[in-house]
């Protein structure tokens, strides 16, 4: 129960009686003062007045408490000498396997000896220790303290940690090659909004005699300010469900409400429990995370920029329409002498069919028409035309929030990358490069890099037919709304009619003959608009990508999924995305997809 601020002047004597001999060591009081009438010397003190529960809470969009400051019970085991683990397990109500696992997780490295080990206990377990009075297992020490407590294991990259409680993690991180990297990038909402969550201590400035009695003050007293609660945009149940789908796989999933920019689910996989980086009994788990080859502590949606693959065909098509390089009815032959096409399909006689089949030669020619067309302001100088067109293409693409940070309220967001004409001049060692040397842009490969947040925002932009609110994780600060910048609507430089032209093709992707027809939600009455992507990878299996939104006509959720080394976007990424959509829109998964859901979750646990 949160303690309201009391009138400290009414209880001043009680406070001073207990704190008279103490002043804040980092803020020393002034020199002693002598009363000119009595000659008695008074000692100035500075006394902190604070509620132990001063820090604000984190709540999800449905007001479920996710993080709070609560009493924590810690059991300190003896440093040396034999420990009767069987007796300890019986005392706590744990089996022998649980005892060994909990102790192993608490050790900073396997076989550590003479290291202080503390185990977190539940209240009922702590009461067993108190009743036992160390008769069964001697030399046990039970302590209590207030600390940030997570009520859910999901959402670790979002919730983050309080800096002061993560010192053990920082110490471990400094001993690894990635120490500074992780220290600066895992703080989440707790670090980003620390100033609002923390509140402010109050201070009393009494003058005390030798008996600890007050004789006025030497400075103005100040009252403490309660930290503000943060109401997050996350749906806690959707977040937990999405984490089960990705589990130990490498990748990310970002789901947001396109109408507001509120992030509904934010998964960076492999996932790990929220308390891992601050819990005193998770040193061994932290060591494994820091050294793991899959880098689970990397906040992938914000900090990892990858080629988006065929998902980027949506951007190229919108820009080509805006620059009048194509029309919605433009037809291009599936000419595999230009670039290979892995889909066997009918002729793509329109943009909608090109998207439905994700025909690589079609979009090769779309981009070729864009780059090689000669603007009216130029003569037949094709070198100048290519430079001008690529510059214009990049200008339009950047209006999607690409090649720049979106300003999301997470630490260390990266901007991604879109190449410039000057970049190719330098990379090719000539200004006379041709379209053939940059055609990978047409397939979302090569030098293009997007973050997961940008991918999800791309889906939201198309859902909104050309505009977006910056994605964000906090929808309310105390009784107020989000930060002002998250209420500013951003418009792309593409006409809304050109986004409208993309929708039929994205809907067709999810219908019979489309690249993701197996992931249709038509059986439950939900029309999904989507686009699959398979990102070529020279160092292993291809990466799978998908972006989409639903319902197609009145979108309420936009999702981006990226799974490393998972193969085709249609078979790996699309199923995860549509099940998150279905879970959010319906609250449950239809029986038709239950076997599918179970298979994906089993794979996520195995990897």
Image (cartoon, helix red, strand yellow):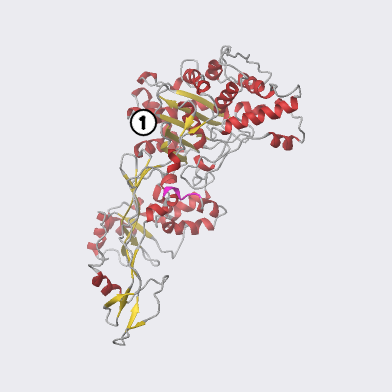
Residue found farthest to the front: 37
- For the magenta stretch, what is the residue range? 185-189
Q: Is residue 182 rendered to the left or right of residue 593?
A: right
Provide residue 253's location: percent of width, then percent of height: 46, 35
Crowd band around label 1 with a 10 angstrom C-alpha radius: few (<14), some (14–19), many (20+): some
Q: How many marks?
A: 1
Using the image, determine if residue 129 lies above or below residue 381.
below
> What percent of the width, then of the height, locates residue 198?
38, 56
Q: Nearer the viewer, residue 526 or 111?
A: 526
| Residue 70 in view (yes/no) | yes
**Which residue in the protein does label 1 denote?**
584
Is 187 covered by the magenta stretch? yes
Q: Can you see residue 438?
A: no
**What residue lies at 46% left-to-right and 59% top-to-bottom?**
111
Q: Is residue 371 left or right of residue 216?
A: right
Which corner quadrant of the image does residue 175 belong to? bottom right
Q: Nearer the viewer, residue 149 or 342?
A: 149
User: Which x, y percent locates residue 248?
Assistant: 46, 40
Looking at the magenta stretch, what is its main secondary structure? loop
Where's the N terminus, which quadrant?
A: bottom left
Which quadrant of the structure image shows residue 537? top right
Q: Position of residue 62 (x, y in %)?
A: 31, 39
Vertical relation: 43 (above or below) 125? below
- The residue nearer to you, when weighing 547 against 552, is 552
- Label 1 residue SS: helix
């Amino acid at each position: 129960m949160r303690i309201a601020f009391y009138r400290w002047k009414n209880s001043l004597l009680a406070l001073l009686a207990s704190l008279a001999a103490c002043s804040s060591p980092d803020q020393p009081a002034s020199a002693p003062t002598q009363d000119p009438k009595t000659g008695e010397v008074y000692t100035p003190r500075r006394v902190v007045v604070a509620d132990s529960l001063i820090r604000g809470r984190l709540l999800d969009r449905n007001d479920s408490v996710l993080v709070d400051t609560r009493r924590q019970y810690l059991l300190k085991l003896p440093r040396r000498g034999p420990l009767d683990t069987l007796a300890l397990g019986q005392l706590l109500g744990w089996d022998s396997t649980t005892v060994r696992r909990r102790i192993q997780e608490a050790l900073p490295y396997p076989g550590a000896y003479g290291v202080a080990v503390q185990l977190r206990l539940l209240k009922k377990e702590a009461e067993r220790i108190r009743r036992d009075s160390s008769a069964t297992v001697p030399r046990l020490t039970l302590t209590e303290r207030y600390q940030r407590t997570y009520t859910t294991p999901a959402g670790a990259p979002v919730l983050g940690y309080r800096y002061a409680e993560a010192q053990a993690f920082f110490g471990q991180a400094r001993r690894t090659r990635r120490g500074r990297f992780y220290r600066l990038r895992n703080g989440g909402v707790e670090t980003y909004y620390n100033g609002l969550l923390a509140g402010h201590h109050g201070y009393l400035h009494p003058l005390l005699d030798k008996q600890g009695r007050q004789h006025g003050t030497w400075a103005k007293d100040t009252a403490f300010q309660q930290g503000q609660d943060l109401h997050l945009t996350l749906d806690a149940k959707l977040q937990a469900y999405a984490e089960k789908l990705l589990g130990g796989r490498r990748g990310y999933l970002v789901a947001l409400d396109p109408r507001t920019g509120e992030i509904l689910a934010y998964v960076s996989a492999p996932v790990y429990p929220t308390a891992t980086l601050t819990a005193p009994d998770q040193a061994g788990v932290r060591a494994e995370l820091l050294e793991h080859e899959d880098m689970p502590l990397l906040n992938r949606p914000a900090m990892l920029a990858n080629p988006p693959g065929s998902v980027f065909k949506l951007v190229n098509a919108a820009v080509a329409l805006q620059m009048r390089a194509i029309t919605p009815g433009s037809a291009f032959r599936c000419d595999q002498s230009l670039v290979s096409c892995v889909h066997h399909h009918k002729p793509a006689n329109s943009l909608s069919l090109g998207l439905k089949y994700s025909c690589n030669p079609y979009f090769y020619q779309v981009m070729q028409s864009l780059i090689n067309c000669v603007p009216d302001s130029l003569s037949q100088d094709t070198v100048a035309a290519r430079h001008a067109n690529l510059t214009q293409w990049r200008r339009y693409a950047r209006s999607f929030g690409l090649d720049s940070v979106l300003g999301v309220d997470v630490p260390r967001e990266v901007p991604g990358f879109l190449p410039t004409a000057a970049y190719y001049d330098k990379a090719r060692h000539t200004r006379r490069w041709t379209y053939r040397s940059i055609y990978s842009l047409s397939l979302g490969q090569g030098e293009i890099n997007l973050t997961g947040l940008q991918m999800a925002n791309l889906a939201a932009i198309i859902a909104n037919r050309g505009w977006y609110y910056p994605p964000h994780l906090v929808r309310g600060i105390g009784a107020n709304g989000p930060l002002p910048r998250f209420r500013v609507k951003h418009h792309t430089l593409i006409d809304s009619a050109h986004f409208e032209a993309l929708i039929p093709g994205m809907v067709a992707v999810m219908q019979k003959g489309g690249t993701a027809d197996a992931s249709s939600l038509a059986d439950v009455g939900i029309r999904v608009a989507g686009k699959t992507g398979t990102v070529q990878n020279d160092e292993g299996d291809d990466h799978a990508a998908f972006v989409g939104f639903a319902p197609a006509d009145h979108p309420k959720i936009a999702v981006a999924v990226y799974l490393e080394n998972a193969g085709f976007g249609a078979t790996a990424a699309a199923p995860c995305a549509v099940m998150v959509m279905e879970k959010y829109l319906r609250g449950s998964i239809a029986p038709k997809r239950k076997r599918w859901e179970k298979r994906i979750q089993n794979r996520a646990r195995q990897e």
